[in-house]
Image (cartoon, grey):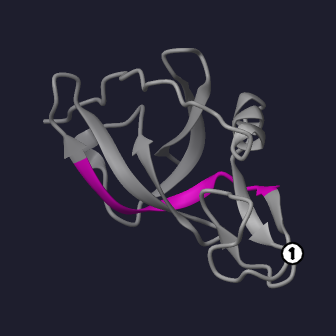
Amino acid sequence: MSQQAAQRVPPSPVPDPSTRAFWDAAREGKLLIGRNSRTGRVHYPPRPVCPFDDEGEVEYVPASGKGTIYSFSIMRAKTPYVIAYVELAEGPRIMTNIVRCDMAALQVGQPVRLTFVDSEGGQPIPMFTPA
């Protein structure tokens, strides 16, 4: 028996100066990741200081929106939802939700693609759906 993930409305984020570019890009349908300009290492969430190396500037670059499910759990709340780690094609793993899916059919290693779900206040939140 399949169970379609219900449309859960996530709470609104509270942007601050260090995350404003990320949320502005989300309004344009883009997922940003951070990249160290010296080493090329990428990270998520993007932040002003590289978590791997304190040398080099961090630049925000758009992710392809492609990934695979690394791990997931079905949260059997009043409105069930799927929380997951998705490994982006660029390398970083991000905690997110899998939406618009048959929860019973999800598998580790399954390809997913970026989508956006509006939060309570209307800010689009990056999430993923089966590819």
Corner quadrant of residue 78: top left
Q: Is residue 9 magenta?
A: no
Residue at label 1?
37
**In the depicted structure, whether residue 15 falls above or below residue 72:** above
Q: Residue at x 23, y 23 (%)?
A: 79
Q: Is residue 62 magenta?
A: yes
Report the residue at 42% width, 35% height from top. Answer: 99
Q: Which residues are magenta?
A: 61-73
On the rendered structure, is 30 left or right of 38?
left
Expressed as whole percent of the image width and height from the top left, the position of residue 113 reads 57, 48
For label 1, count other residues whose C-alpha is less than 10 Å away and answer few (under 14), some (14-19) or many (20+).
Answer: some
Where residue 115 sits in the image (x, y, percent)? 58, 37
User: Where in the figure is residue 66, as x and y percent of width and height?
Assistant: 62, 56
Q: Residue at x 60, y 72 (%)?
A: 91
Relative to 50, say whether 34 is above or below.
above
**Label 1 secondary element:** loop
Query: Which of the 4 image quadrants contains residue 35?
Result: bottom right
Q: How many marks?
A: 1
Q: Is residue 30 above or below residue 46?
A: above
Q: Residue 14: percent from the left, percent from the top?
A: 57, 30
Majority SS type along the magenta span: strand
Residue 22 falls in image quadrant: top right
User: Which image quarter is the N terminus in?
Assistant: top left
Residue furthest to the top: 121
Query: Please, what is the three-letter code of the amino acid marked with disc 1?
Result: Ser
